[in-house]
Image (spheres, rainbow, N blue to C red):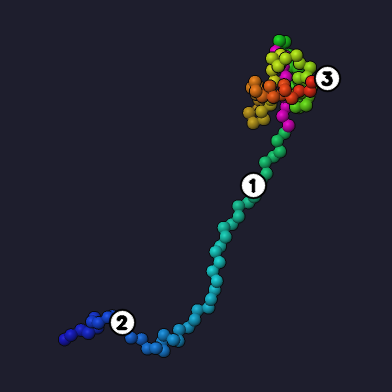
Amino acid sequence: MLDTDTKGTGARMVPLEDTLAKPEKPFTPIAPRLPARAPEPKPPEPRRPRSFRVTDVLSRRILAENADARGTLDLLAGTRSIVDVTIDVWDPKAGRWRRLAHGEKSTLWNSRHRPR
């Protein structure tokens, strides 16, 4: 006996009524979900004004401690030379005084209020 189910194109005949009468699915738009926003980071705390310590090189006497920039510049105006003093700045992260490098010290020296 000859098996006819496996012969031919393999196409299956479907009645026309079955193809035309498909129930339509309701249209639902798909919107992508946005990821949840991360909370806003806290703004950094305002930086405190720098405080300076000025020490006389010859006598090792502290001329100013915890002085603001304006007070330090006023003190430097009365100083004879840049090499007569050492200048330190308070580093709050390290919790100690940091000696200014020569370039930083020169910047302060050039900004001092010179008497006229």
Dot 1 or dot 3, earlier in sequence: 1
Q: Please give left or right for residue 28 compared with residue 20 in the image.
A: right
Q: Which of the two discs, 1 and 2, sits closer to the camera?
A: 2
Amino acid at circle 1: Pro
Q: Can residue 66 be seen from the camera position used here?
A: no
Q: Quadrant of residue 89?
A: top right
Residue assigned mark 2: 11
Residue assigned mark 3: 116
Q: Residue at x 49, y 81 (%)?
A: 24
Q: Residue at x 63, y 51 (%)?
A: 39
Amino acid at circle 3: Arg
Residue assigned mark 1: 41
Q: Can residue 103 be seen from the camera position used here?
A: yes
Amino acid at circle 2: Ala
Q: Nearer the viewer, residue 77 or 33?
A: 77
Q: Secondary structure at mark 3?
A: loop
Q: Which of the two discs, 2 and 3, sits closer to the camera?
A: 3
Give the class, few, some or many, for how many residues have Cα within 10 Å of label 2's Cα (few <14, many ≥20): few
Q: Nearer the viewer, residue 114 or 6?
A: 114
Q: Secondary structure at mark 1?
A: loop
Q: Residue at x 20, y 84 (%)?
A: 3
Q: Which of the two discs, 1 and 3, sits closer to the camera?
A: 3
Instruction: Please report the bounds of the magenta region as a residue range.
Output: 49-57
Could you tell me residue 20's position as x and y percent? 44, 86
Q: Please give left or right for residue 33 compared with residue 55 in the image.
A: left
| Outermost residue toward the left in this view | 1
Give the class, few, some or many, for how many residues have Cα within 10 Å of label 1's Cα (few <14, many ≥20): few
Q: CA distance from mark 1 to mark 3?
A: 50 Å
Could you tell me residue 34's position as x and y percent? 57, 60
